[in-house]
Image (cartoon, rainbow, N blue to C red):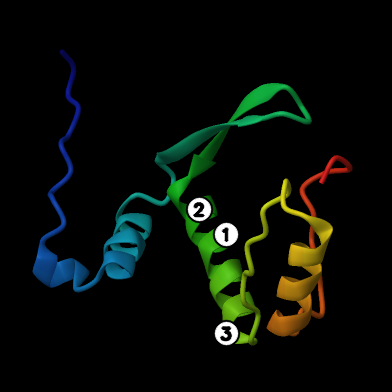
Amino acid sequence: MGNKQIPEPITPEQAGTLSGLFYERVQRSPDKLAYRYYDTAEETWCDLSWAEAGARVARWQAALANGLVIVPLYTQDRAENVAYILQNAGVKLLLLGDQEH
């Protein structure tokens, strides 16, 4: 079966929190595969290491620390409802998934 080494589990004391668990995994196995996802633009499967996942999460945390807040919208909602939400949330930037949205 080979000499695969089983990693030691991360204990609740070591993790402390859910985000602590994530960053502990990043530190312990930065080059290991964390996630696979399908890139629809490239039409291919992509791998993401724990270090890359950690860097992406850190970018989002930095954005939220700067006062950015995600305001979810239903793309099938009526225009009046979307306008109401955008106005009352004080939205300064709107990011859309694609032209359809």
Image mark for residue 89: none
* Residue 99 locus on image (x, y percent): 89, 43
Residue type at mark 3: give it. Answer: Ala
Are circles 3 and 1 on residues that touch, CB within 8 Å? Answer: no
Quadrant of the image occupied by residue 39: top right
Mark 1 surroundings: few (<14), some (14-19) or many (≥20) residues within 10 A: few
Residue position marked by numbered label 1 in the rendering: 56
Q: How many marks?
A: 3
Disc 1 from disc 2: Cα separation: 5 Å
Q: Nearer the viewer, mark 3 or mark 1?
A: 3
Q: Which is more toward the observer, 43 or 27? A: 43
The N terminus sits in image quarter? top left
Q: Which is more toward the observer, 86 or 7? A: 86
Residue at disc 2, secondary structure? helix
Disc 2 from disc 3: Cα separation: 18 Å
Residue occupying image coordinates x 73% and y 22%: 43
Choose the circle earlier in sequence order: 2 or 3: 2
Residue position marked by numbered label 2 in the rendering: 53
Are circles 1 and 2 on residues that touch, CB within 8 Å? Answer: yes
Residue type at mark 2: give it. Answer: Ala
Residue at disc 3, secondary structure? helix
Quadrant of the image occupied by residue 12: bottom left
Q: Which is more toward the observer, 12 or 31? A: 12
Residue occupying image coordinates x 79% and y 54%: 96
Residue 96 located left or right of residue 54: right
Work out whether 28 lies above or below 5.
below
Q: Which is more toward the observer, 87 or 49? A: 87
Residue occupying image coordinates x 63% and y 86%: 67
Residue at disc 1, secondary structure? helix
Image mark for residue 65: 3
* Residue 59 locus on image (x, y percent): 61, 69
